[in-house]
Amino acid sequence: MSGLEKMLNPRTTAVVGVSTKNPFFPGNVILRKLRFESDLPTFAINPKGGMVEGQKVYKSILETPDGIDLAVISVPSKYVPGIIEQCGSKKIPSVIVYLEVSVK
């Protein structure tokens, strides 16, 4: 499978930027969509760890099992470069970055 195929049809995903306190956080919405609409194995990531919706939350992408096809990153922009580096270390071939922009 090529990197593009893995992005469009991933077998395993990770969502970086979930909240254990706010179910409406963008990362949580993305996690639910992936888990319930596609039934894909999906890993949740937050530096504090914990649990979200009955699922273990990993503290880092580096702690997740190998073989993730797609990482969806939903964190403040200053953290994105470091997370992209971690994805490279884990050999995750595809990344989608979701940045929420506030318009005032």
Image (cartoon, rainbow, N blue to C red):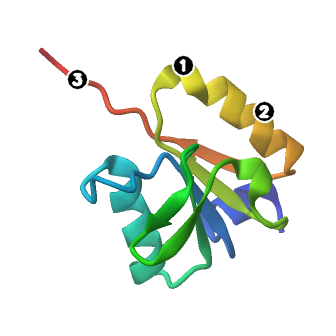
Residue 100 falls in image quadrant: top left
Q: Nearer the viewer, mark 3 or mark 1?
A: 1
Q: Residue at x 31, y 54 (%)?
A: 21
Indicate the position of residue 51 as horizontal and vertical percent values: 48, 66
Q: Quadrant of the N terminus?
A: bottom right
Q: Residue at x 50, y 23 (%)?
A: 77
Indicate the position of residue 12 as horizontal and vertical percent values: 68, 72
Q: Which one is in front, 2 or 100?
A: 100
> Which residue carries the number 1 mark?
78
Crowding at mark 1 (Cα within 10 Å: few <14, some 14-19, many 20+): few
Q: Amino acid at mark 2?
A: Glu
The reply to whether the C-beta atoms of the residues labelled 3 and 1 are less than 8 Å apart is: no
Q: Is residue 78 above or below residue 25?
A: above
Q: Which mark is residue 62?
A: none
Relative horizontal placement of residue 64, taking residue 15 as reference (left or right): right
Q: Which one is in front, 90 or 50?
A: 50
Q: Secondary structure at mark 2?
A: helix
Give how far apart the Cα atoms at labels 2 and 3 are.
26 Å
Disc 2 or 3, which lies upstream in sequence? 2
Disc 1 or 2, which lies upstream in sequence? 1
Indicate the position of residue 54 as horizontal and vertical percent values: 44, 78
Q: Which mark is residue 102?
A: 3
Q: Residue at x 39, y 56 (%)?
A: 20
Give how far apart the Cα atoms at labels 1 and 2 are.
13 Å
Q: Which mark is residue 85?
A: 2
Q: Quadrant of the C terminus?
A: top left
Residue 23 falls in image quadrant: bottom left
Give how far apart the Cα atoms at labels 3 and 1 are.
16 Å
